[in-house]
Amino acid sequence: MAAKMAKLIYGVITSLDLFIEDASGAFDWAAPDEEVHGFVNETQRDIGTHLLGRRMYEVLRYWDTAATDSAASPVEREYAETWQGTEKIVYSTTLPPVTSNRTRVERTFDPASVRRLKETSALDISIGGATLAAAAFKAGLVDECQVYLSPVIVAHGKPAFPGGMLLELELIDQRRFSGGVVFLRYRIGSPAAAQD
């Protein structure tokens, strides 16, 4: 019997029109409330490694110390503890060496090394950042999408998903939250014909 391969999961909080930030680069509208944050914590328990672009890493670096922040809520402290227990690989050509625990910098995104990571990891892998995720989608590495649709339309900004490709998706889970956020979990099917 073949060993189970770890999944590569793209988790993203988007506007209803599928932008991760608005035209000014802001994404404060995407901050999860307590209920959504608690659910995110549950989904992160099976993650062993985070693959991150530079900007996503700089945003998420807050969680390195959030567990000791007296203003942090219990759900935030729980996420911080989970985050600190995972490996982080940051892809950047310009980021200087990092001092965060369990974090290393890779200068290029190498699909073959990510495939090896999937084959050898006991826990699933998340990928964060639309630009990095686009490279993983194009390499056929992403197994699952976890999308949190926020009840806001921003009209312009940075898209959550890459253009130029068509993927078949299978809905495997969904959930509605009291604040209007909708969670959709999709399994990635076979790549269909590329779109121009």
Image (cartoon, rainbow, N blue to C red):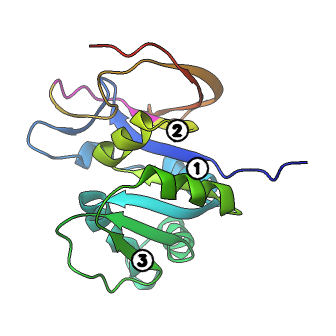
What amino acid type should be assigned to the residue bearing mark 2? Answer: Gln
What label sits on residue 39 in the rendered view? 1
Please provide percent x and percent y for residue 4. Answer: 78, 50
Is 193 above or below relative to 59?
above
- The answer to which of marks 1 and 3 sits earlier in the sequence is 1
Residue 114 position (above or below residue 94): above
| Total tally of numbered discs in the picture | 3
2 vs 1, front mark: 2
Left or right of 179 in this view: 105 = left
Quarter placement of the C terminus: top left
Q: Determine the secondary structure under disc 2.
A: strand
Point out residue 95 in the picture as x, y percentages from the top left corner: 21, 72
Tell me where the magenta segment starts and ends, as one range: 148-155
Residue 168's mark? Answer: none
User: How busy is the neighbourhood of tag 1: few (under 14 within 10 Å), some, or many (20 plus)?
Assistant: some
Tell me the element at label 1: helix
Q: Residue furthest left?
A: 24
Question: First in sequence: mark 2 or mark 1?
Answer: 1
The amino acid sitting under disc 3 is Thr
Horizontally, is 91 left or right of 5 in the view? left
Which disc number belongs to residue 146?
Answer: 2
Q: Residue 57 lies in magenta, yes or no?
A: no
Q: Secondary structure at mark 3?
A: strand
